[in-house]
Image (tube, helix red, strand yellow):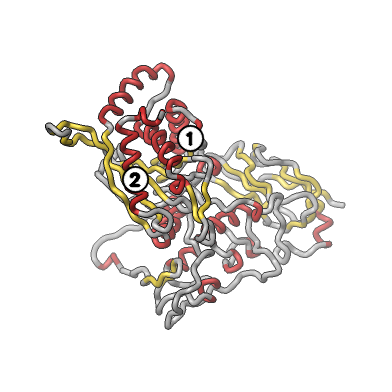
Amino acid sequence: MAVVEVKVPDIGDFKDVEVIEVLVKAGDQIAVDQSLVTVESDKASMEIPSSAAGVVKALRVKLGDKVNEGSVLLELDAAGAADAPPAAEAPSTPAVPAAAEPAQPEASPPVALPPAAVGVGFASEPRHHTPPTAALPVHEPAATTALLPHASPSVRKLARELGVPLAEVKGSGSKGRITAEDVQAFVKAVMSGQTVTQAAAEAGVGAGKGAASLGGLALLPWPKVDFAKFGPVSSQPLSRIKKLSGPNLARNWAMIPHVTQFDEADITELEEFRKSSNERMAKQGVKLTMLAFVMKACVTVLKQMPAFNSSLDESGENLILKDYIHLGFAADTPQGLVVPVLKDVDKKGLAQIAKEMGELAATAREGKLKPSDMQGATFTISSLGGVGGTAFTPIINAPEVAILGLSKSQIKPVWDGAAFQPRLMLPLSLSYDHRVIDGAMAARFTTVLGELLADLRRVLI
């Protein structure tokens, strides 16, 4: 029996990277270049492949371990390689099957990721559309139904969040392994009209020649323009966050019937209270922001109107009401917008909300958010108050059913019954899913929220 130690190869300048996924277990038959673990630094994540083939005799790492170049990952019985079929014919089983993970889209944010969330929603396309006269080519399945597609848990999770059928994705990795780039390429192909999914084809969902299919919608193909003929041009790749969030935003905008309710809240007294409170709390290292007050007020409104704190199930016929309130908030980072999630906001006071929100925002700017930091939001708030603007239409972060946008507050003359008074008004933009929420409900939401912000003592009643 030839026992081989498989070690971490040269991974560049990365030191003490954390093991976030273990993709094999003792007894698994693995092939050369098959992924063994996924490691993550503060800048990137990567899969470590096997340098030899054989049967896993013993694992030498576990989740959370820190490894460097030369660290031993596992012991391999190289003699067992001849006793089992290659991994390309029988994909390895991860230590924790990806299918057992809940399919939770992230963060979306106007946003984020995600960890907050990205997708195009192929899996739940309706099946009652009239077939087009000319269908797009159907993407050929890359694997038979008898075998699972060869992909890591992280790629499987990404595919679930995008609604991508992995069996129809052709892998470009070693031994036909499906990579995250393959999944993203499949999404782009469907959105650009180069292909349709098997489910869409069987349902008669497609479009005329050259059209794109998105959730059963027949869309014109993206225009192909040679911009260079009009003048000098240059090409700049999108950031990773924009590449991931783009398909999600397109899916949400195309498949959710958005309506936006615009309103204003008088925050004159609240702003004075916020400033005076910050003077008292400066020694505690806590800074109260207007967003913290809005979160606290939203908790009260969400409890009064639970439909805004719900999600539609996959059938679209049942509403899932949540007994917890996790609020996502858009955070601007050098890499792009992300949506950290503040958990159990209904159980926290203003100071704790402000403190945890500041910590999450700082972690986001450093690029150190964990996936769990961007998951589970029931309602999202996107604030542009620090930038400007009077109103906007935030895109709903599916599977949520509403999102609140905040713009820059400004002094306006408001009639008090006897004279115009200068009041500080905060613009509110509430986008909602019209399948779940009607206009009257949305108007009541912003009205109640405005009343609470005008006199936050109402939260105590």
Q: Quadrant of the C terminus?
A: top left
Q: Residue at x 54, y 64 (%)?
A: 123
Give the SS element for disc 2. helix
Q: Earlier in the sequence, mark 2 or mark 1?
A: 1
Q: Residue at x 39, y 32 (%)?
A: 292
Whole-percent x and y of residue 122? Answer: 51, 65
Give the SS element for disc 1. helix
Residue labelled with disc 1: 345
Residue labelled with disc 2: 444
Say if residue 334 shows up in the picture: no
- Residue 436 sits in which quadrant? bottom left
Q: Residue at x 78, y 49 (%)?
A: 26
Q: Nearer the viewer, mark 2 or mark 1?
A: 2
Q: Residue at x 36, y 68 (%)?
A: 222
The total number of labels drawn is: 2
Whole-percent x and y of residue 219? Answer: 38, 71
Give the numbered dot on residue 184: none
Say if residue 160 shows up in the picture: yes
Q: In front: 245, or 287? A: 287
Q: Are discs 2 and 1 less than 8 Å apart at CB? A: no
Residue type at numbered disc 2: Arg
Whole-percent x and y of residue 259? Answer: 34, 55
Residue type at numbered disc 1: Val
- Residue 408 sits in which quadrant? top left
Horizontal side of residue 76 vs 14, given as left or right = right
227 w.r.t. 297: above or below: below
420 w.r.t. 442: above or below: above
Whole-percent x and y of residue 234? Answer: 32, 58
